[in-house]
Amino acid sequence: MLGEVSAQNSWLTVIASFIPGLLLIYVYSALLGKSSQPFPLMLEEHLGIAGKVMGIAYIIVFLILASFYLRFFTEFLEITVLFNTPTSLIILALLIPGTYAIRSGMEVIARISEVIFIVFLPLSLLLLLTSVAAHPDLDNLLPLAFISLQDLGYGIYLNTWHLANMIIVLALAYFTCQRDKLPRTLLVFLVTLTLYLSVAMAVSVITLGVAIVSSSNFPLFEIARSASYAGFIRNTEPVFVSIFNLGIFISVVVFWLMACYSTQQLFRLQDYRFLATPSAIIIGFHAILLSPNTYTIFRILRYSAPLIFGVFFVLIPVLLYILLLFRPRKVNEQTGSGLQSPET
Amino acid sequence: MMRCIPIMLLLLSPFILSGCYDKLEVSDTIVVIAHGWDIQGDNKLLSAQLALTPPREGQLQRDPKYMTLCSTAPSFAQAARELSLTLPRQPLWSMADTIVISEKLALRDTTLFIDTATRNPHIRYNVKLFVARGVTPAEIFEVQVPPENYSGTALEKIIRIQTGQAGIYMPIDLKDFIYRNSTEGIEPVIPQIVLESQKGQKGIRLQGTAVFKGHQMVGELDPAQTRGLALMKSGAINSTIFNIKNPLIGREEEPLKMSNNLCLELTSYRVKVKPLINGSHIKMQIVLEGEGNIVEDNNTSSICEPETVQDIEKEAARALKQDIQMCIKQAQGLNSDIMGWGLAINRIHPRTWQKIRDYWPEIFPGIPANIQVKYRLNQPYLQKDAFLQQ
């Protein structure tokens, strides 16, 4: 999709989206610094009843995004490797470990994420870089930076929604022991993500060329499918699919967890873990009902998903931050803020 | 109770193992070595070379080692599925390394196969493409190419190995073809194969390159022109071999023959193709720097003198330049930008390209090329001079 918009300069738009990423970190850090309650309770803390209503809207958004990621995952598998497997079974295959992970608690998910990150990042980078080694055409990246402002803006807009995943820090920050170091951690995350995405885009363009990248549903899968390492390691798509599955699992589970956690917070429930099973049913059914076909999924990915991310994860936090600039509020010292541990 | 739930879920999980729906028993499948795309009237004709199961250990190899099946339908996908009406096994299309396109189809319209090539998850981008000139793909698949068991495998090996031997044809895979087909300022080419008779037996031979313009084959390059094309892309071939007239003997206008020839090889080369734009005047600058060795000398004159070496280098450069010129002349004659000059302009002068892209078919045939070739002689192998030199 990005290749369609910004062609050979896709990787540059990813790097350019570092700037809105920095802005997001600044806004999220500022919100954490001014709030005693984790997200979405911080909305209620600052906006009262309107914040509570918005909090409920966020629960729905988290559920929608979890089911969207889940459906995207199933579409990917059905298009690429599991052609005949029913959608519902693939959904179940992901929901079962997801339910188990959420029931085990946030700490378990954090540990899983850590392990997946350590496996995912080096392995996928290795796969990308070895793929490009066979027949690289660096000239495919030319003409460099020849892009209209409109396309650049649209490219940055499409990238920013990946970066806006950082919003979960507004809730998770309150669980960390070193809250004051969060902005630095977020910065490391931003650098890693932008570098990773830009390398992935650049490798796609160098290996396949702009025209193929633009028309293909999964260019990285095409690279893995046609890769040949030293002439004898071929058919590497199962490795790629396994790596992709790990990333998708985390994407689904994190938004799912956020939906459960937000529900617990907003409705003052004792725990969020028991919500895993009922929410799994909602997410599973919604993933199936979301779209009758793959075409609609790709239209959602292109038009609706960036809009949802843009409004709920960028626009609303930015507006809240602006509001708080004019309406300063003292943080409860007993609970501390998102950037400051409570006084003991 | 709470502990039972995950255990129950785990126990249930084998029943929903998604892979079972896509399972394929080896005994129910057959490996596709190559497939061919052709047309027959208003239908598409798909042919497939399928590998028959090799004999078990201790058993003698029985012929045939392969079978060729053909199927006709309005679409290649349907033709492939309709093979199941006669074939008791499921073809593994993704195992194919070679696709042979008939000349008839290439002359008609490449869009007739380009969609199935890109949409079908069983066709890989690294599969090698060939155009069958004057024959059908099925006829190619029926040819025996010893020592290979299958002509499909043989084709893939021939095109790969010749890049370091004869060094004429650059292998074109599906990705290259789609890239050239869908990118502005560059047109596709595909190596051609023909059938030839050797001692009463049919054999296959790489012969010429099919040239496309847009979605149609418009002509071909002969082997010398094809080498010229390969020389304009660094790394397209690993090495090549060519003959020049020995500068020490014979008159300049005398044709190249057995007695006056000096056989050289080009072992490595670098080429830079750069558009020079001066106002509305476009000129292509092609600078090739290569090096190689003397492989065979058919006369007795001494060739180790520095002046002679220089003369040989000049003559070699002239020969390579001639191939490039012939390729350019043919491409411009066919009005097909197979060298990718338009793409080169787009990459280096994108603004100029924006202005001329619509008129490129009118501009391209008239673009002059300034070709500079430098050839450096490296070594004479095991002889320091001509063996019979007195």
Image (tube, coloured by chain):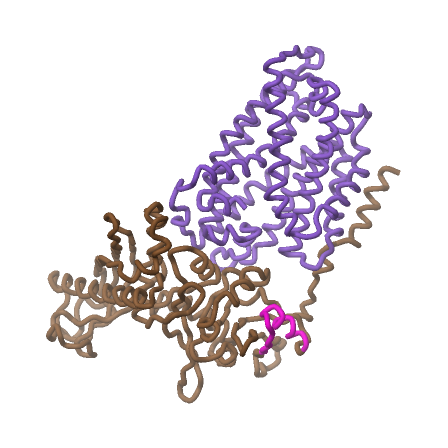
Image quarter hosting the C terminus of chain B: bottom left
Q: Residue furthest bottom?
A: B200
Where is residue A68, by image quadrant? Answer: top right
| Chain drawn purple in the picture | A
Query: For this view, does A57 lie left or right of residue B61?
Result: right
Q: In x, y percent, where is residue B232?
A: 31, 59
| Vertical side of A225 occupied by B30: above or below | below
Query: For this view, does B307 lie left or right of residue A249?
Result: left
Q: In x, y percent, where is residue B379?
A: 23, 62
Query: For this view, does A29 lie left or right of residue B174?
Result: right
Identified at 60% across, 74% down, the residue is B73
Nearest the viewer among B32 and A205 is A205
Identified at 56% across, 74% down, the residue is B44
Q: Is residue A231 magenta?
A: no
Image quarter hosting the N terminus of chain B: top right
| Vertical side of B32 occupied by A294: above or below | above
| Vertical side of B298 occupied by A28: above or below | above
Where is residue A286, by image quadrant? Answer: top right
Query: For this view, does A230 lie left or right of residue B248?
Result: right
Q: In x, y percent, where is residue B316?
A: 21, 65
Where is residue B270, by image quadrant? Answer: bottom left
Q: Is residue B76 magenta?
A: yes
Q: Tell me if residue B47 can be seen.
A: no
| Vertical side of B134 occupied by B277: above or below | above
Q: Tell me if residue B324 can be seen.
A: yes
Nearest the viewer among A25 and B68 is A25
Question: Chain B shown in which color?
Answer: brown
Identified at 41% across, 51% down, the residue is A137
Q: In x, y percent, where is residue A290?
A: 71, 46
Magenta region: which residues?
A: B69-85
